[in-house]
């Protein structure tokens, strides 16, 4: 690889495998979301009732609490990546785009922190 | 002052009103719409978790709103969003590996996915209500 111009060296080598990072991240989080969403849906169907005591009892168990924490995280992550694509497709004015993506990041982190806090509190028996 | 490329009036390529709608287009735009719907649904989930973590009184407030007519409508909409987005998402995985682009197969599976989103949502609610 020592010879020729820089363009000559990269020609034919294919992707740099970093430009596709966002695209790949959506796929990775989608797989996690798929598994956990099926778990969540089946779990809801298997709960005998949705009253306060029954749901609290379910979420005090270690495995459901862990799965729910992951469910919250992966879906916020996947949603954040997806909304970014939508913003980039439809918001063309630079300032508005910057503001939208800024708000998206702040809301995503706030939502994730709040969701995790609630799951931990439920699992450790507060409230 | 020159306008930026984003705000200058530029010619547009033929748009929504020009193309004849096909199954692939329906499935594709539904994937985006239900993706946004599912993301909005995260906030319903967070409210539910927040209410649970806050105690019985807050949970009762959530339950009252969630079982009101508008609440039911939102929950059905969110569940359809999540289920339909999951189904069309699996379609995208298939398309990602380069399969399913033949006209007949593409049309068929796009229609199957759109229908499956609605059918599976109905099945989910039936299972939920008949427990």
Image (cartoon, coloured by chain):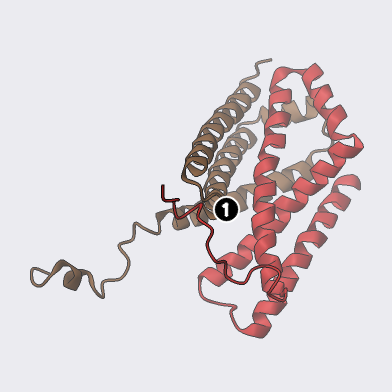
Of A66 and A95, nearer the camera is A95
Q: Quadrant of residue A58?
A: top right
Image coords of residue B38 (percent x, y)? 68, 47
Q: Quadrant of residue B52?
A: top right
Q: Is residue B63 above or below residue B69?
A: above
Of A57 and B84, nearer the camera is B84
Image coords of residue A47 (percent x, y)? 79, 39
Q: Is residue A126 above or below residue A75?
A: above
Q: Which residue lies most toward the top here?
A: A127
Q: Which residue lies most toward the front here?
A: B1
**Quadrant for the C terminus of chain B in the image:** top right
Q: Residue at x 58, y 35 (%)?
A: A69
Residue marked by disc 1: A90
Q: What colour denotes chain B?
A: red
Which chain is disc 1 placed on?
A
Q: Which residue lies most toward the left here?
A: A3
Of A34 and B77, nearer the camera is B77
Q: Residue at x 53, y 35 (%)?
A: A103
Image coords of residue A53 (percent x, y)? 79, 24
Image coords of residue A20 (percent x, y)? 40, 59
Residue A32 shown left or right of residue B27 in the figure: left
Q: Residue at x 51, y 37 (%)?
A: A99
Q: Is residue B49 above or below residue B128?
A: above
Residue B86 visible in the current orientation = no
Q: What colour denotes chain A?
A: brown
Q: Residue at x 68, y 35 (%)?
A: B43
Of B77 and B112, nearer the camera is B77
Per the image, label 1 sits on a secondary structure element best described as: helix
Residue B85 visible in the current orientation = yes
């Amino acid at each position: 690889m020592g010879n020729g111009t820089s363009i000559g060296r990269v020609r034919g080598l294919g992707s740099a495998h970093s430009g596709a990072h966002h695209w790949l991240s959506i796929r990775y989080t989608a797989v996690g979301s798929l598994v956990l969403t099926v778990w969540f849906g089946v779990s809801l169907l298997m709960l005998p009732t949705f009253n306060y005591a029954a749901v609290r009892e379910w979420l005090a168990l270690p495995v459901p609490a862990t799965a729910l924490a992951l469910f919250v995280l992966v879906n916020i992550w996947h949603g954040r990546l997806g909304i970014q694509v939508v913003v980039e497709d439809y918001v063309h004015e630079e300032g508005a785009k910057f503001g939208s993506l800024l708000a998206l990041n702040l809301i995503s982190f706030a939502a994730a922190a709040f969701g995790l806090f609630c799951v931990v509190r439920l699992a450790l028996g507060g409230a | 002052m020159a306008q930026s490329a984003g705000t200058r009036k530029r010619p547009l390529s033929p748009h929504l009103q020009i193309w004849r709608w096909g199954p692939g287009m329906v499935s594709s735009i539904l994937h985006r719409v239900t993706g946004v719907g599912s993301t909005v649904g995260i906030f319903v989930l967070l409210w539910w978790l927040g209410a649970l973590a806050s105690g019985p009184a807050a949970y009762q407030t959530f339950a009252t709103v969630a079982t009101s007519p508008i609440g039911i409508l939102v929950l059905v909409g969110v569940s359809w969003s999540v289920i339909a987005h999951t189904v069309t998402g699996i379609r995208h995985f298939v398309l990602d590996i380069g399969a399913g682009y033949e006209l007949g197969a593409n049309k068929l599976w796009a229609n199957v996915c759109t229908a499956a989103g609605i059918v599976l949502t109905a099945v989910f609610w039936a299972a939920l209500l008949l427990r």
